[in-house]
Image (cartoon, coloured by chain):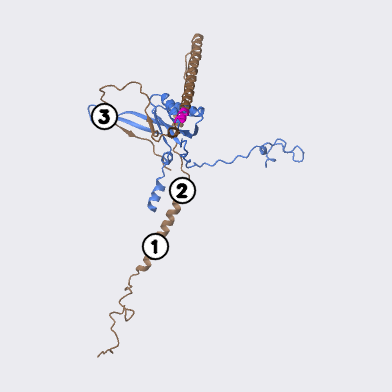
Chain colours: A blue, B brown
Amino acid sequence: DALLSCHRSYRSRPTHGIGRYKYLLPKETPKKKKDRVQMKEINTGTEYEYGDINIQMTSYDLCLVEHFAQYVHRLCNRLSVRVNESYAMPTRTNEVLFLEERGSKMQLDAVLTTHQRIVQISGLSSTFAPILLEIIQSNQPEGVHLLMKEHTEADFKSRLKSRPELEELLAQMT
Amino acid sequence: SSWLPQGFPLRGSHWQSSLLELRTSLPVRAQPKKKKKVDVRKEQAQKDRLKKKIKKLEKAAPELIPIEDFITPPQYLDSNRVRSLPALSPEETERRVLLLKRWCLFKQKQDEAEKKAIQTLVESQQEALKELRLESEELYQAAIRRDEGLFPFERDGPKHTPPLPGYDPPEGKCVDITKVYTQ
């Protein structure tokens, strides 16, 4: 098929299939859309290394949190700290209602969106961890809430869609 | 006149099958035994159906919740909204370009100072650890160990202004209206 799909097909001539090159390229495996479940946690060794750590940045301001996440990612690249993943959590929308001075009606004040970005690093050595923490803290912009914690399965599952039908059926089974 | 030979025992009812034992077989009028079998089969069939449904649902891979940040709202895609900027004079552009260059230089110096600070921090830490090792091996090992109380670490960003003294916020509440996605 590769020989015949080209538009100049003088099959009898010795120059047939002259422009072929795709057979020389490495074979591309078809992409499977499956999320791999978990990464292993590193917790051993006398010269301790921390396992997977999530740096979570939360703020109301989207651009600020996005830029800070990019800064942290580049910082880790520069300091040769391995970055596993860098993703965003779904945005939360909050409606702020306040009680009017006269009257019992709740008035709509604002609609705020909370954005969260996560940079996941691993293989952080125990001597370097406080230094990294110090750098990130000193460059933390205003309004951005920083949280560093270990990566757990619950954290991973909070990114996935809930499946009420499956849960119902599993509850019926047991 | 009925007479029975002495060796012949009396039968209480015709349900008693054997002469010597007590009543063992139930009076079988309605058929409960068959109902039990059908129930067990029905239950098993139900369980199998449930298992099949669960397998089918579990085959589908779990999906990630779509993030609204990365989807541009359609109101910004429809019309060609072009901002009309005022024309700048050459002096203004010159001033801006020079300002940009000065800012770039300032930021570069700041970044280099930061890198140098990190470098000195790491070096001094390594030196201190070396000296500690020479002092005592035990303390060195204890210092190398990782800190369990370090994570989870939480810190709020610096605020623009300090909190106002005697500020009375109005009463109200926050309602979470995020869209819940189900698979």
Question: Element type at marker 2?
Answer: helix
Q: Are marks 3 and 2 on the same chain?
A: yes
Q: Is residue A8 above or below residue B7?
A: above
Label 3 marks which chain's residue? B
Residue A93 in the figure: left or right of residue B101: left
Check disc 2 and report the residue beneath it.
B58
Q: Is residue B134 magenta?
A: yes
Where residue A61 appears, as percent x and y from the top left, is 40, 26
Which residue position is annotated with label 1?
B40
How far apart are labels 1 and 2 at the CA level?
27 Å
Which amino acid does the dot numbered 1 rest on?
Val
* B14 within the magenta span: no
Q: Residue at x 48, y 25 (%)?
A: B123
| Residue identifier under label 3 | B171
Region rendered in magenta: B129-135
Q: Please tell me which of labels 1 and 2 falls first in the chain.
A: 1
Q: Nearer the viewer, residue A159 or B45?
A: A159
Do badges 1 and 2 share one subunit? Answer: yes
- For this orientation, the residue located farthest to the right is A13
- Label 3 – label 2 distance at C-alpha: 46 Å
How far across and how far down the image is residue A79, in percent?
Answer: 50, 28
Helix, strand or loop at mark 3: loop
Q: Secondary structure at mark 1?
A: helix
Question: In the image shown, does A83 or A30 lie closer to the viewer?
Answer: A83
Q: Residues within 10 Å of mark 3 (few under 14, many from 20)?
A: few
Q: Residue furthest left?
A: A102
